[in-house]
Amino acid sequence: MKKILMILTVILFSVANNYTTAGEGTEGKVLPYPIYQKKMANGLNVVTVPYDSPGLAAFYIVVRTGSRDEIEPGKSGFAHFFEHMMFRGTDKYPKDKYSEVLKSTGASANANTSLDRTVYHMTGSSDKLETMFELESDRFMNLKYSIQGFKTEAGAVKGEYTKNSASPYSQLNEKVQETAFDKHTYKHTTMGFFADIVDMPNQYDYSIEFFRRFYRPEYSTIIVVGDVTPENVQALAEKYFSTWKRGDYVSNIPEEPVQTAARYVHIQKPGFPPFLDLNYKGPAFSDKAIDMPALDVLNSILLSDKSELYKKLVIDEQKCRFLGGGAQDSRDPYLISISASLINASDMQYVKDAIVAAYEKAKTTPVDAQLLKDTKTHLKYSFAMNIDNPTSIAESLSAYTWLTNDPESLNRLYALYDKVTAEDLMMVAKKYILPTTLTIGTISPNEKETLQ
Amino acid sequence: MKSYIKTILTFCFVALLASGSSAQELVELKLPKSNKVVIQLMFRNGSICDPAGKEGLTALTSSLVSEGGAGTLSATDIKDKIYPYSASYGSSCDKEVSNFYFEVPADYLNEFYPILKDLMLNPSFKEDDFERVKSNQQNYVDQLIRQSSDEEYGKKYLEDVLFRGTNYQYMTSGTSEGVKSITLDDVKNQYKNFFTRNNLTIGLAGNYSDEFVTRIKTDLKGMSSVVPVIPTPGKAAMAEGLNVEIVAKDNALGSAISAGFPLAITRSNDDFVALMIANSWLGEHRKSYSRLYQKIREARSMNYGDYTYIEWYESGGSNMLPPAGTPRSSNYFSIWIRPVQTASGLKGQYEELKSIEIGHAHFALRMALKEMDALIKNGMTEEDFIKTRDFLRSYTKLYIQSPASQLGYLMDARFYGRKDWIKELDALLSGMTLDQVNKAIKKYWQTQNMNIVIITDKSEAEPLAKSLRNNSPSPMSYSDGLKASLSPDILNEDRTVESYPMPVKKVSIVESESTFRKSVPSDNKGILKIQK
């Protein structure tokens, strides 16, 4: 018996030694579970987080391609469209067979695309993990769809645009991105320009090229959270993904020039609550620089429902129904968005002035030490309260994976929050909240809004 | 004989309701390893308890309790206090229940609990909080519902048509006239009469102590002692033939379709499980392997998805899995066809479609009805039955991944007279036979009588109404590029679909601006019927 134990220990030890992060412990980290990760020879990163969810596992594949990579004119929306195509089958599992096998797993499965990434996810029974691996490896390596399937799927994407377009907020967001950016691909939304969507059925050849470029191991990370072991996950990854060939493509994303004057977009919409959207150019995400964590802390202090500004505009003066915002985490510099839903369009200037005044004050006035401390614990507890199931943990890890290619960035970001000082808050306010990098979006019944 | 049975049934129903609203119930889910505590307080009231002319009152009452001040604390004071440990709370109001949800780190339960207690027992009901919360609700019923998502709009309007003249007709947020007429005194009265210790179920999940259970039970006995008189929930009326209401609005890019008819059973009835299997095969929410999705989206590229439902599904546009918290005793079957293209949209996109008169709504409806007819007529095959049953046995366990959702499903189970729905469901699914499913399909489903709602662009409304009224053929209008790539099977099937008979009885066009405006006539609401 002892001998068996010894052998087991040796095996376990030798396997565990192969992980880059295992054994470092979780002390002081915001995620109270160890992140095991190991990069395969072909560049595919495999991440496992064992979690006490008996019989349940979340299986995610993060591909670091999104609308950011849509650099050619006329190809906007393609990363998202391609996400749809990934459900169109292979030789081994044609579309109907794929659906049938997926159904047999009883999993909740889907995918979504954003600026910087495409995420494929399944949550289901952990004893179906091997089937999930087999299905996913097959389509990630051997996707094969007909021209007919391609053209048909394009209609579904148009249908998605059609359903989203009913919301004036979607319409405004489209205009804000288009106006705020000149050169960078963040100029278009992930859905893409409508003209490009209508033209999608004619882009079959480009879709093959898109798959060749981005659906490669070096762009991808597998994340499994739940009732699993790192050994099992790693073994399945080796079994099903080791023959996946590395690619050689690197996107050459145009750099956005510095914005030098405020820009404006407006949607006239009677019968809809007036809306103000202030968008400043922000930094790219980093788990090393203090800028993004400091902005998160600053925005929580200035915009959360306990902030002075919220109390003034929403509770006391009742000028706004809603106030909120923040800096979006993204690979390249994106936007710090501050939004307010107003009761009267005539208060647009007043509300804008109040928001700007709060940020101007933050440039020169150090924040109260207790408030800074409370905000740091607030951010940590907000996160801790959310990670109560395998899906939400996998979601969090995938976010940091697409940002830096390393899920440990999650822990590093929260460690940085601890280091943010009152001076850092003043620094980021001065650095990023500038009248010259602002794009103002408005919705109101008026033909135009002229904000100073 | 009939009247004797009716009397007994009425008596039983009264007795059931009375028992349901006279005792404080407790649902517990202890999770000692959890880092938090989830508390859900469910009141058996809901929008059916809104007085005539005050539609939206129960929702406004629950919102004001959760968004206003409490005890000596203002709304802002509360936010200040809970900010460092990030406790969260909120409320929801459905047709027959209201819920209050609280989540707090286990370490801060004792610090947070007095706030919870004051919110529930001593809401401050200040005039300025009332004005703020009411204004937001008014804004939702006046503007947001019409302008944010045509799909959500269509679903809410389908209920308006299905339940017309009953207390289930209006949105839980109310009507424009109803919300406008609500006063702060109305809210105070509603709180006293319908948020009481006698219609409350306390739900606890996570890492809490036995002492805490005793404490919250004892404290919440301090809520109003009124025994609420809960009105009889309104029932959906069966349409005569197909009754179509087209809601016309400006600048709609697509036509969003919802259709439905009354369903006599709920989760209380084991036949419901048989229908779950049939429904999953025909139109499981957001699943590509269901029949309608494959026919309308996958094969023909007409929209983003097509689903069917045998009970209310909260915020279907944003949820992949069904959330708990909306148990209902009045039920209906529904079809959700996500927005399809309009004629003006297609004309702008494709030169070859310049001469079409209607978009894809008529064809999509025919396709859905044809598929449903075939299922009713032929039943499921043994193979499909087994695959779908096995899928559901695994899939439904995903409904309860978090402590909050697990607790929510346990609490909903009580509403339906069950103890642990997800657990019982597994046993019921495993024992289900194909024969039971096919019998249930024939017993509960049909396609001849249905209410249909289409939210669409003003330019589409009249030609579509005409096409539906005349039962005109509605050939699919594909772009040339797509049509050339479609298989002959699909094009042949299209020819059957385009003239599939629809027993349309009535088609009306409704101006979007007129929807959800007026109060429901009081003599039709059925309030207090239970006492007769």
Image: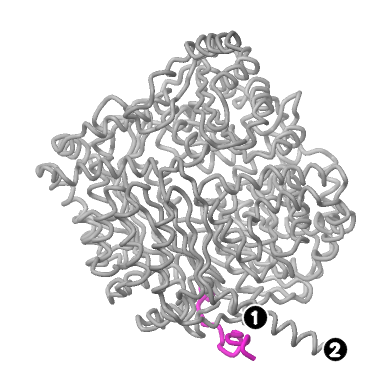
Does residue A447 appear anywhere in the picture? Answer: no
Query: Which image quarter holds the C terminus of chain A?
Result: bottom left
User: Can you give x and y, in whole percent of width and height, for residue B106 in the image?
Assistant: 37, 47
Secondary structure found at label 2: loop
Of the pair B177 and A425, the residue shown nearer to us: A425
Residue B465 in the image: above or below residue A381: below
Residue under pointer 2: B1
Residue A450, can we see it? Answer: yes
Residue nearest the observer in this picture, A361 or B68: B68
Residue marked by disc 1: B15
* Residue B302 position within the rendered picture, expressed as x and y whole percent measured from the top left: 68, 48
Q: Along the horizontal axis of the image, is B432 left or right of A315?
A: right
Binning the other alpha carbons within 10 Å of mark 1 as few (below 14), some (14 to 19) or many (20 upward) gives few
| Magenta-colored stretch includes residue B516 | yes
Residue A107 location (% of width, % of height): 65, 39
Q: CA distance from mark 1 to mark 2?
A: 21 Å
Please identify the quarter of the rendering in which residue B188 is found.
Answer: bottom left
Task: Count all numbered tags in the image, as a single digit.
Answer: 2
Question: Which amino acid lies under the numbered mark 2 shown in the image of this protein?
Answer: Met
Q: Main secondary structure of the magenta part?
A: loop
As for residue A65 lying within the magenta part, the answer is: no
Give the number of the mark in front: 1 or 2: 1
Which one is nearer the viewer's eye here, B400 or B24?
A: B24
User: Looking at the image, which residue is at 46% across and 17% down?
Assistant: A250
